[in-house]
Structure formats: C-alpha cells, structure tokens
Image (cartoon, rainbow, N blue to C red):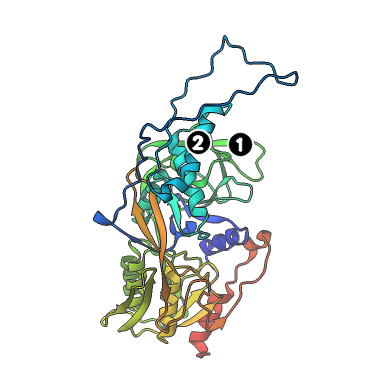
Amino acid sequence: MDSTLRNVIKFTLAGLLVLALTATAFVAGFGSAHLLSGADVLPMAQPVDSGGLEQPTPVSPTPTAESPPQADTATPAPTRTLVPIPTPETPDEEAFQVFWEVWDLVQRNFYGQLPDLQQVTYAAIQGMLDTLDDEYTAFLEPSVASILAQDATGEFEGIGAFVGLDEAGFLEIVEPFEDGPAAQAGLLAGDRVLAVDGTSIVGDTLYEGIGLIRGPAGTEVVLLIEREGMENTFEVTVTRERLEITIVNAEMRDDGIGYIRLREFSAKANESMTEALEELLAQDPRGIVFDLRQNPGGWLDQAVEVSDLFLDDGVIVSERWSDGRSFSFDAQPGDLGEDVPLVVLVDRGSASASEIVAGALQDRERAVLIGELTFGKGSVQQVFKLSDGSELRVTAARWFTPNDRAIHGQGIAPDIEVPWPEVSEEDVPQLDADPQLERAVEYFLTGE
C-alpha cells in the first residue's frame, strides 16, 4: 500500500477533515454541484427602507440602593450609528420584524464592541439555514468561496500540502505534495502550524488559516511549526509556487494489473483519467483496478464523463429536482475503456460523484465493486454567486442510479465486502497491507 493511502487512512481513523491547501469544497461536504451563471445568479437582498418609522425610546432603570454606581460621565460612550428598523409591508416582512427589534435594542444597550452589520448578516444567514436541517445547504463567505472556486480548477498558488484540523483544533500538515515547496522546505506530515508570518492561527477555522498561508507564487511565508518529539517550536520559510493538484495516480503492477486512483472529481478529472487510462491500456493490462476510496466527489459533469470512459451507452445517473423535473445523463459509445475488465474499490469515504460512478458501473454490470458501503451523499446543490462574492449552495435535487436506486442516505453496497481492519492510529504506519486492493487482485487472478 502506498504512503499516500496510509496517510489518508490514518487521518480518517482520527476523524479529521482532510483538505488540501487547496481545501476543496467537496471534501468539506458540499458534494457535486451545478454552477449557475448569468441570469441564474441571485443578488443579495437589500435592506428595506425604514420609511420614517419612529424608533422605540430606550428605558432607563430607576436607581435603587442595590443599583451599581453610574459610569463616569466625563468619559462618554462611543457614538454608534444605528441601523433603522425597516417598515414591514407584507405579513412575511412583519414576521421578520422581531429580528430588527432585537438588533435595535442590542445596538442601543449592549455593553461592548458590536460586530459590523455584515458579520451580523452572515450570522443570521447561517442561523436561518440551520433551521433547514440539511448540512449541504450552506452559505460560504467570500474568502471561503474564493478558495473553493480556485481549488475546483485543479490549480492554485500556495505551499503545496494537504492540511486539516486535528482533534485539538490545530491546523496540521497531513501530507506535503511530492517535491512541492512545503516538502522542499522540510515540512513533514503531522507538523502543526501555530502562526503564519507572526500572526497566531491557533483557534482559527481551517479556511482562515489557509487564507493566510496562501499567496502569490514567488512570495515567501513564514510558518511557526510544532513537531512531535521536538521540545521547542521553530520557523520554516516556504516560497509559494503555482501548483497543480495531482488528482490521479496510476501504475502498472508486476502482476500485469493496472491501478488508477482518482482523488476527487475536480475540473480536470476526466482529462487526467483519460491520460492515465491511455498509458495503462497501451501496456495491455489483464484488468484495471479503479480506486475511488476516500474520494469525496466533485463536479457532476466530470462524474458523467469518467463513467462514460467505461460504458458504451445507456443511463449513467438520473436527477430529480424539487420542482418535479427529472433528467437522465447517458453514456455515448466509442470510449477507450469500454472493454477492459474492471474492479472498483469503494469505502466509507467514497461520496457524491464517486457514488454516481460506482452505482452506474455496478448497475450496468460493467464492474465489480469491492470494499465497504459508500458514504450515501446523493443530493445536488445549486450554486448561486451573490453580489459580495459569497455563495449560497441549496440542495435542490437527488440522484438515482440506472436501476433507480436512491444514493442519498443509502450509499452503494459493494459486490464483495472487504472491511478495513480496525486498528489504532498508532498502528497505521506499520500497516503495509491493503486487504481491499489485495482482494481486487485476487478477483482478477481467480475470477472469484
């Protein structure tokens, strides 16, 4: 088993969310999406004019013997510009009126620094979406939306490392890119990043940390590192580069079986898969092991095109929308991988677009699935770009396999179940065997 897969398994066992310095949206749990443009983009709502509505007068308590001493009148409180309460014009606006009443009272009475209205707006949006009880319907602030949009292209400028938050909430280097800037600077898997250019990121979100670490190619960033086994922290200077995320690994094994691993369905998934498949087929393999383990998904069009590499015709996936519309996406004959014997590896980390591909190849009896039940993320998110650079992702449809099996909440069950051994995090570095890949090779060699 290669070191990359061992690292992925290690951090999956630890319950970490593994993201690239890169941090792709799909790993974040948003799954495959449609990107709307032009007239489909919804503008951010504007506040309703107050219309001269009289503001409530704050009430001052009558002093009593128990009242605290009054503030020194020689030190005036900072002047605040109050946001007026809008005048409701419809029953729905009237129902929302209590929000403005609360904010008006907070503005007038809160002892302390108030957040700006943008922060309040973002927090209100997050709270509103929480009431939908759907983790995939989400609001992304501009900084996060920008990072994810860049990652979806498969290219970015940064230090070249997969990162995540560990169980204690520290930003951790999961795996430096091979020969990338981080690796060349001496960063290792497991290193904790405590500060960026002298600014502490302890307690920050993953995206806040990534936002500071990223930067234009050719510039330097200084990271304060904590490394297990070393008593003192130390600084590492990394020169950022323009990088391409390697999403496909392929090799011809000594036993004559080709192996392709696809990490995610980013914008170049089909292009990268096609190149790898051409190289392997030129060596006349006895079969291909297509590894979709720990692949969190990505773009729908890429899932359809990758499926089509191995299918001659027929339905790949059906999509049913909230307004009753239904669509199917079909394969077209003439692709290079339609005849090669195929085994697909899946596990609990195979989600979204990965499940579309696995479900299509299984239902069409084109491949044998080996591994574990997949994640079960079969919903579609429409992506709306908002006026300030933020994004709203709304669950608007569900996916179904060619045999009309629901993916969402169900997952795709393998034809041959091979669970991953239950081991502790400390045991993973010594775990060199890959029982799921070994079972795939056995299937090719024995036919069973």
Seen from this angle, which residue lies furthest top? 74
Report which residue position mark 1 lands on.
Answer: 233
Horizontally, residue 311 falls left or right of residue 293, namely: left
Q: Position of residue 228 (x, y in %)?
A: 64, 46
Whether residue 236 is visible to the viewer of this picture, yes or no, is no
Give neighbour class at mark 1: few <14, some 14-19, many 20+ (Cα, 10 Å): few
Q: Residue at x 31, y 79 (%)?
A: 330
Three-letter amino acid code of the residue under disc 1:
Thr
Residue 356 image label: none
Q: CA distance from mark 1 to mark 2?
A: 44 Å
Q: Residue at x 44, y 70 (%)?
A: 354
The image quarter in which residue 280 lies: bottom left
Whether residue 420 is visible to the viewer of this picture, yes or no, is yes
Report which residue position mark 2 lands on.
Answer: 103
Q: Residue at x 31, y 69 (%)?
A: 275
Q: Position of residue 214 (x, y in %)?
A: 42, 42
Seen from this angle, which residue lies furthest right? 65
Q: Nearer the viewer, residue 80 or 151?
A: 80
Q: Nearer the viewer, residue 394 or 443?
A: 394
Q: Is residue 347 above or below residue 425?
A: below
| Mark earlier in primary sequence (1, 2) | 2
